[in-house]
């Protein structure tokens, strides 16, 4: 049973516009969330994180929003750049229950120049 | 910058062969992990280690085994490869339990 879901396998956005990637989770005990970015033939690279005590975390062009009541998080990229084209994975864990992260299936973002 | 290495990057091998996938990190991280990922699917944790001489199985059942004799080295071994083992194998490490993990580039394994 998949505990972290990314329901959009792909997304295309025009350069300069906002990219919004979504992620839903089912386990209400999850309290730490991460986004990873993956280029072809490379491993995932950590992008940004958020803990459940916050509802927003911002790092440059990247902002992650957490809605605990809806068990939903999203990654906003503004402005989108062609170099942002990659697969984005969200991951969630319950901090007190070991270090296991549960990953979504990824969303492939294409930023069109 | 993360310094975590995996070899080989690609491996095509026949059924029944024994293989070892190598993973090394130079960051001194105690925590290391092996994930398996099929195309379009999520990453599944198959093994992890909290330090030297510590190994645990992850949620996804795997016929592979791991060892952790040195902090920097976390190899994964398949005693007898089968076509069902065809997948991408990703190694990761982290400095703390619960911290973000740094991933290696992965090994894409094909068993014929």
Image: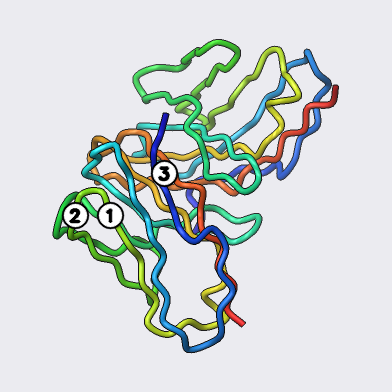
Q: Please provide percent x and percent y for residue A96.
A: 23, 39
Chain ID of residue with mark 1? B
Residue shown at 41% from the left, 52% from the top:
B91
In the image, residue B33 sits, relative to residue A60, either above or below, namely below
Rate crowding at label 1 as few (under 14), some (14 to 19) or many (20 or more) other CA atoms within 10 Å. Answer: some
User: Label 1, on which residue?
Assistant: B73
| Disc sitting over residue B70 in the figure | 2
User: Label 3, on which residue?
Assistant: A27
In the image, residue A9 sits, relative to residue A80, either above or below, namely below
| Disc sitting over residue B28 in the figure | none
Horizontally, is A58 left or right of A39 in the view? left
Rate crowding at label 3 as few (under 14), some (14 to 19) or many (20 or more) other CA atoms within 10 Å. Answer: some
Chain ID of residue with mark 2? B
Residue shown at 63% from the left, 20% from the top:
A76
Horizontally, is B38 left or right of B31 in the view? right
The quarter of the rendered structure image containing the C terminus of chain B is: bottom right
Q: Please provide percent x and percent y for residue B89.
A: 48, 60
């Amino acid at each position: 049973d998949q505990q972290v879901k990314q329901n959009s396998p792909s997304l295309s956005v025009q350069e300069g516009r906002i990219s919004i990637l979504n992620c839903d989770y089912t386990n209400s005990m999850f309290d730490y969330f991460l986004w990873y970015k993956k280029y072809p033939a490379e491993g995932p690279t950590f992008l940004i994180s958020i803990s459940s005590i916050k509802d927003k975390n911002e790092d440059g062009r990247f902002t992650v929003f957490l809605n605990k009541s809806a068990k939903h998080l999203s990654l906003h990229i503004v402005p989108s750049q062609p170099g942002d084209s990659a697969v984005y994975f969200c991951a969630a864990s319950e901090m007190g229950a070991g270090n296991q992260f549960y990953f979504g299936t990824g969303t492939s973002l294409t930023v069109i120049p | 910058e993360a310094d975590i290495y995996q070899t080989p990057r690609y491996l095509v091998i026949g059924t029944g062969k024994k293989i070892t996938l190598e993973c090394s990190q130079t960051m001194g991280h105690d925590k290391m992990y092996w994930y398996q990922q099929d195309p379009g699917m999520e990453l599944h944790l198959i093994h992890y280690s909290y330090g030297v001489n510590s190994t645990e199985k992850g949620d996804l059942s795997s016929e592979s085994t791991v060892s952790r004799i040195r902090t920097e080295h976390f190899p994964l071994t398949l005693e007898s490869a089968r076509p069902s083992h065809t997948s991408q194998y990703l190694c990761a490490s982290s400095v703390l339990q619960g911290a973000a993990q740094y991933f290696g580039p992965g090994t894409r394994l094909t068993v014929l």
